Image (tube, helix red, strand yellow):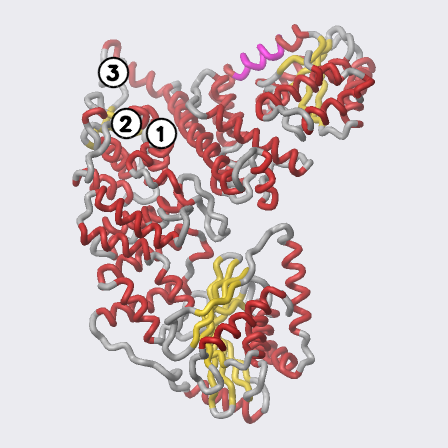
């Protein structure tokens, strides 16, 4: 008996409560020993509560039954009796056990049943049956517990053909609801796919004797998830399974890890192991259950391919050299020799992806022993890689099967650095490695648009390979691409194109959404970077694939139209067409002139809201004409924010004594407001009777409360060098918030600069806005003046005042 166990029943030591506190906060145990010791301590306490009894047993089930108590875990306990003790007697025993547990403030999941009642409940309740599979005797009649446990396993194995499909559906439904643990910034360690629930389900499958999960790494993965939950419970003092952002650094420290990223990466690795084991196991379950159906027996009776007695061998359909399909999976042919065929892993993976079939785990394990590829790769290896990447969605599962056995890192050592690496920008749905293969899958649908689909697919695979290393990931990735491409067998010219694509994979999206497309400097920046029409074509497709693989906030009809227009203009310039040097805005249209004249006649704002002529996505064209006066930009931006209109672009200019503001806007949700309502609020905003700053401050406070605990980087305002020949370009990077553009406009207005145009780009919770500003004479700002204006805007945003 340990000192802590003895303390559990020693009144002088404070009993179980004091012993529990010492174990959790004073003793040096952690991991499995801590959970096991906590279970033993709890066993001893509950045994004392039950006391001497006949025909009654106290049984731990679920996680407690497995001896895996985390600091704030529920106690799952069954009071089992043989039915000979009357109801009053059983109730008295239950009260003797349950009430002290409740008095301790511990969560208790309890039930009182006879063995027959327990089996009946389990037959109609899958979760109850799963709990009984982990039943463990605590105290009382051990024979009673043993008989129930034996019966629970016999029932489970007898009912497995019906129960396992039900369990699989339960796991899949939970995964749909909770998401993939290995891609979530705030994962639920228990309920998300690849979490502790799935690991428990794999134990139940093994108990059925129909199939077994891959054992390599699975217990370590489960233990790591449990260790993380222990640290989370101790950090928060709560029974929570959700690893929230604000707690990750402290949980990491509790586990002795360097930082929150190291924590997430370890958790993601564990979840990947559990998810892959689940995929393999459920495929095996399906195969076994199909083989037990009547159809194979019917084939044997009727005869057919096979050996003696009409036995039907599994059909093996050739897919490629050394690769065949068997029973819905891709396996190696009997004649395959991985040790003599270094291209076999890529050939098998490409065949599987092209056929839309999973790679057999046994085949992947055999291919892990394949001879290394010579350097540079032979042409067949490079072609098979491109074929694999070009298969579309099936590529993802095949690639992950290779990753599970370490084959990807053998083929591409740089991959190990991005493997399971988290991306803390909420715009990203995936970890870095998954994002790269998702980008290749998206790019496969765009290969008909480009002259070199092989370069597009490989660039998609490598475009973020520099992430997680010091420095700009695009520049780091370019250097890595220059090393990787020759190893894959690409010549010097193709290597240069791949390096350019990796270096500039963000260029088109950032330029199109943050720069004035009518400014010659914008087009020149793109043409100087890409150099030729072929590279521009590839970069256009890569930009779309990258955005689509990032998440829904990264791509839209509006962004697509801006990128396409930028590419059209850059392609024209590369073809030798002159780029017009625009120093003044385009001439006003008749409609704009009429609106300006109406504003001057009425001495008030005029608002016109309509769909744009080209009908880009969900955007609307808003034209505001108002007699020239201070504060027009912040007032208009504030009114739009109050009406939940998101600004995409804005252009301002003078026109015969009036100010003309051209906006592209989109309603956050619902129908856009009426133009008359916007005009009424704008009149009040300009005369000071509408407190825009106060109204926006209230909304921002509510916005902040809904996101309490989230830490945001401070706003940054920088001057884009060479951004324009006719204006100074200020780039604003900040956390999105109601009225942000209003605050920026106020700061610029107070700085006495003229905003020629604004280009607003919102990605999830972050904005990157570009403002083309000039002095009162229409010239770019002098160096010191530009710095002062940038600092003024940055200060206004950091203060967060309306």
For residue 750, side relative to residue 757 (left or right) = right
Q: CB of mark 2 within 8 Å of CB of mark 1? A: yes
* Number of residues whose C-alpha sits closer than 10 Å to that of mark 1, classed few (under 14), some (14–19) or many (20 or more): some
Q: CA distance from mark 2 to mark 3?
A: 35 Å
Left/right of residue 105 with respect to residue 228 in the rendered view: right
Q: Picture coordinates of residue 532 (x, y %)?
A: 22, 63
Locate the N terminus and report the quarter of the image it occupies. Answer: top right
- Secondary element at tag 2: helix
Residue range in magenta is: 147-156
- Which residue: 35% across, 33% down? 401
* Residue 581, image quadrant: bottom left
In the picture, the disc for residue 405 is: 1
Can residue 502 be seen here? The reply is yes
The quarter of the image holding the C terminus is bottom right
Question: Which residue corresponds to the image point at 22% horizontal and 18% vertical from the top-left?
Answer: 305
Q: Nearer the viewer, residue 591 or 191?
A: 191
Q: Position of residue 276 (x, y in %)?
A: 42, 31
**Mark 2 vs mark 3: which is more N-terminal?**
3
**Residue 303 tag number:** 3
Label whose residue precedes the other's in the sequence (3 or 1)? 3
């Amino acid at each position: 008996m340990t000192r802590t166990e003895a303390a559990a029943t020693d009144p002088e030591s404070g009993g179980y409560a004091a012993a529990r506190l010492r174990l959790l906060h004073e003793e040096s145990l952690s991991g499995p020993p801590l959970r096991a010791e906590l279970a033993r301590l709890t066993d001893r306490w509950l045994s004392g509560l039950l006391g001497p009894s006949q025909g009654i047993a106290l049984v731990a089930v679920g996680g407690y039954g497995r001896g895996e108590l985390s600091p704030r875990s529920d106690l799952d306990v069954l009071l089992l009796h043989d039915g000979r003790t009357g109801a009053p007697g059983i109730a008295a025993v239950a009260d003797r056990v349950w009430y002290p547990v409740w008095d301790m403030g511990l969560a208790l999941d309890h039930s009182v049943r006879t063995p027959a009642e327990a089996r009946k409940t389990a037959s109609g309740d899958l979760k109850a049956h799963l709990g009984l599979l982990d039943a463990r005797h605590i105290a009382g009649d051990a024979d009673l517990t043993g008989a129930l446990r034996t019966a629970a396993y016999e029932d489970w194995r007898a009912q497995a053909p019906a129960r396992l499909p039900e369990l699989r559906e339960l796991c899949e439904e939970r995964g749909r609801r909770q998401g993939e643990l290995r891609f979530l910034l705030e994962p639920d360690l228990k309920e998300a796919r690849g979490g502790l629930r799935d690991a428990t389900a794999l134990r139940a499958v093994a108990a059925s004797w129909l199939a077994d999960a891959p054992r390599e790494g699975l217990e370590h993965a489960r233990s790591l998830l449990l260790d993380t939950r222990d640290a989370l419970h101790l950090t928060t003092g709560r029974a929570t399974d959700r690893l929230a952002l604000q707690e990750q650094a402290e949980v990491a420290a509790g586990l002795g890890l360097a930082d929150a990223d190291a924590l997430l990466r370890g958790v993601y690795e564990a979840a990947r192991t559990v998810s892959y084991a689940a995929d393999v196991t459920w495929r095996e379950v399906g195969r076994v259950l199909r083989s037990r159906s009547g159809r194979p027996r019917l084939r044997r009776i009727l005869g057919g391919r096979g050996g003696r007695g009409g036995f039907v061998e599994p059909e093996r359909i050739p897919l490629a050299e050394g690769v065949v399909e068997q029973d819905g999976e891709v396996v190696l042919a009997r004649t395959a020799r991985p040790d003599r065929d270094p291209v076999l892993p890529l050939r098998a993976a490409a065949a599987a992806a092209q056929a839309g079939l999973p790679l057999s785990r046994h085949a992947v394990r055999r291919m892990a022993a394949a001879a290394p590829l010579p350097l540079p790769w032979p042409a067949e290896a490079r072609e098979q890689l491109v074929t694999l990447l070009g298969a579309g969605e099936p590529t993802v599962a095949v690639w992950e099967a290779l990753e599970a056995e370490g084959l990807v890192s053998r083929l591409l050592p740089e991959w190990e650095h991005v493997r399971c690496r988290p991306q803390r920008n909420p715009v990203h749905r995936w970890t870095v490695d998954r994002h790269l293969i998702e980008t290749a899958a998206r790019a496969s649908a765009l290969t008909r648009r480009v002259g070199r689909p092989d370069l597009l697919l490989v660039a998609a695979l490598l475009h973020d390979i520099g992430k997680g290393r010091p420095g700009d990931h695009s520049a780091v990735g370019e250097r890595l691409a220059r090393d990787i491409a020759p190893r894959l067998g690409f010549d010097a010219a193709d290597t240069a194109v791949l390096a350019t694509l990796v270096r500039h994979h963000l260029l088109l999206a950032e330029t199109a959404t943050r720069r004035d497309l009518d400014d010659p400097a914008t087009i020149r920046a793109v043409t100087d970077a890409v150099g030729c029409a072929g590279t521009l074509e590839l970069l256009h497709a890569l930009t779309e694939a990258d955005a689509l693989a990032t998440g829904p906030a990264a791509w839209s009809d509006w962004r697509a139209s801006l990128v396409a227009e930028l590419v059209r203009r850059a392609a024209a310039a590369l073809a030798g067409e002159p780029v017009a040097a625009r120093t003044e805005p385009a001439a006003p249209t008749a409609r704009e002139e009429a609106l300006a004249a109406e504003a001057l006649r009425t001495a008030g704002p005029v608002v016109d809201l309509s769909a744009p002529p080209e009908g880009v996505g969900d955007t609307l064209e808003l034209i505001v004409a108002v007699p020239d006066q201070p504060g027009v930009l912040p007032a208009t931006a504030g009114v739009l924010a109050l009406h939940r209109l998101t600004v995409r672009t804005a252009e301002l200019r003078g026109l015969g004594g009036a100010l003309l503001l051209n906006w592209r806007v989109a309603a956050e949700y619902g129908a856009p407001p009426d133009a008359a309502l916007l005009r009424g609020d704008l009149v009040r905003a300009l005369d000071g009777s509408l407190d825009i700053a106060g109204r926006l401050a209230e909304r921002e406070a509510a916005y902040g409360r809904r996101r309490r605990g989230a830490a945001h980087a401070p706003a940054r305002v920088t001057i884009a060098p060479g951004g324009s020949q006719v204006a100074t370009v200020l780039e604003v990077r900040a956390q999105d918030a109601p009225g942000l553009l209003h605050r920026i406009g106020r700061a610029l207005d107070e700085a006495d600069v003229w905003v020629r145009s604004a280009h607003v780009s919102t990605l999830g919770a972050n904005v990157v806005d570009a403002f083309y500003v000039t002095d009162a004479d229409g010239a770019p700002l002098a160096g010191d003046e530009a710095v002062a204006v940038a600092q003024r805007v940055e200060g206004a945003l950091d203060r967060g005042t309306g």
